[in-house]
Image (spheres, rainbow, N blue to C red):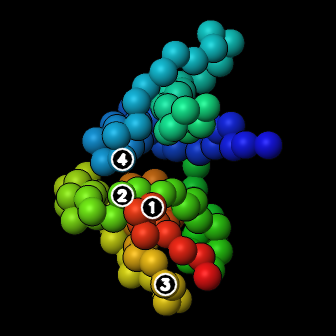
Amino acid sequence: MSFAHLTLATRDVVASSQFFQKTLGWTPISQPDNIDRTADWLDIAPGQQLHLLLVDGFQVSEFEAEFGRHFAVFYPGSDFSGLKSRLVEQGAELIAPIRNTPFERFFFRDPNGYIFEVIDEEDYNPE
């Protein structure tokens, strides 16, 4: 079994898509023509996608947090500095981890309010 896609509600599909493209480098892909709302599909990794959907009145959960709902992605730690700069430039809030781990990581809140954890894929050791 593998991860196929993640769907996120958003107030602004275009801005959200641009955010992920400019920060994490995720690329737009074609989407089915049976979507009855504004949407965008992004390729995260081979066989893994992010689906962004316009949802009127969307409000992010109050449970977005390190010890709550968040989305974790691997990213090369050697480019953490560059990624952090791009995230801030695109309106993200950087958040330091609460819990110590044997590998480097950080969190950010995207412009929609979702929390993402970025884990150093080059030095990942969960023990």
Nearer to me, 97 or 14: 97
User: Could you tell me the amino acid type at mark 2?
Assistant: Pro
Q: Which residue is disc 2 drawn over?
A: 76
The image position of residue 123, as x and y in percent, is: 43, 70
**Which mark's residue is nearer the viewer, 4 or 1?**
1
Q: Are marks 1 and 2 in contact (CB under 8 Å)?
A: yes
Mark 2, secondary structure of its residue: loop
**CA distance for labels 3 and 1:** 12 Å
The image position of residue 125, as x and y in percent, is: 54, 74
- Residue for point 68% across, 12% down: 34
51 horizontally vs 102: left or right: right
Nearer to me, 9 or 70: 70
Instruction: Please give the label number shown on residue 121.
Output: 1
Q: Report crowding for label 4: few under 14, some 14 to 19, many 20 or more residues within 10 A (C-alpha).
A: some
Q: Which residue is disc 3 drawn over?
A: 102
- Residue for point 68% across, 37% down: 4
**CA distance for labels 4 and 3:** 23 Å
Task: Name the quarter where the N terminus is drawn.
Answer: top right
Q: Earlier in the sequence, mark 4 or mark 2?
A: 4
Q: Which residue is disc 4 drawn over?
A: 24
